[in-house]
Amino acid sequence: MYPTLLVIHSLLRWVVLGAAVIALLRAFGGWSSGRPWTPTDEKVGKQFILFLDLQFVVGLLLYVAFSPLTTAAFADFGAAMRDSIMRFWAVEHITAMVIALALAHIGRVKARKLVDNRSRHRTTAIYFGLALLLMLASIPWPFMAAGRALFSFPALG
């Protein structure tokens, strides 16, 4: 199950990032131009949140039940905290992603409660932008010590 979930998590990352960029571009465009909030803005924000939630569920399954890295980290948490790669997987990655998820949700809820178009776009841009920055900083890019390939396809079997 681990290899399958890892592939799904790896591929879904790109969907989430793409949806975040689209939602952010719409938010900044609406904010800067004063464009009215449209059903498309609502749909794009909802899709970003949907993909982000799905990614979180897959990541949580990996974290709690299937990842050999987190299993090893939980077996000796003290040792894991002294190892930068284990610490990244056991604490840093999930903490940053939970905060990014919370920011995206908070931004969407706050924007939906606002009436003013510019305020809705501004709120969405700020919260989605912060969520995207945090996600980008916490993805295990290939150049990082805990890095992974841009597309992870371990042997499924």
Image (cartoon, grey):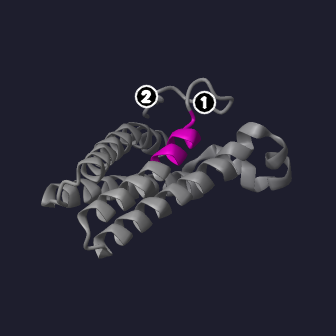
Pointer 2 local density, CA inside 10 Å: few below 14, some 14–19, many at least 20: some
Judged from this view, the residue extending furthest toward the left is 39
| Label 1 neighbour load within 10 Å: few <14, some 14-19, many 20+ | few
Left or right for 5, reference 23: right
Residue 11 colored magenta? no
Q: Name the residue under label 2.
A: 151
Give the residue at x 73% y 46%: 87
At 24% from the left and 64% from the top, the residue drawn is 117
Q: Quadrant of residue 36?
A: bottom left
Label 2: state its secondary structure.
loop
- Image quadrant containing the C terminus: top left
Query: Identity of the amino acid at label 1?
Result: Gly
CA gap, disc 2 and disc 1: 11 Å
Numbered-mark total: 2
Q: In this view, does 137 lie to the left or right of 44?
A: right
Q: Provide the residue designation for mark 1.
A: 147
Q: Residue at point 57% right, 40% down? A: 137
Q: Which amino acid does label 2 sit on?
A: Phe
The one nearer the camera, 63 or 126, is 126
Tell me whether the residue at label 2 lies in contact with that at label 1, contact meaning CB atoms closer than 8 angstroms: no
Note whether 146 is above or below 110 in the view shown. Answer: above
Q: Could you say where residue 139 lies in the image, as x and y percent from the top left? A: 54, 39
- At 19% from the left and 54% from the top, the residue drawn is 35
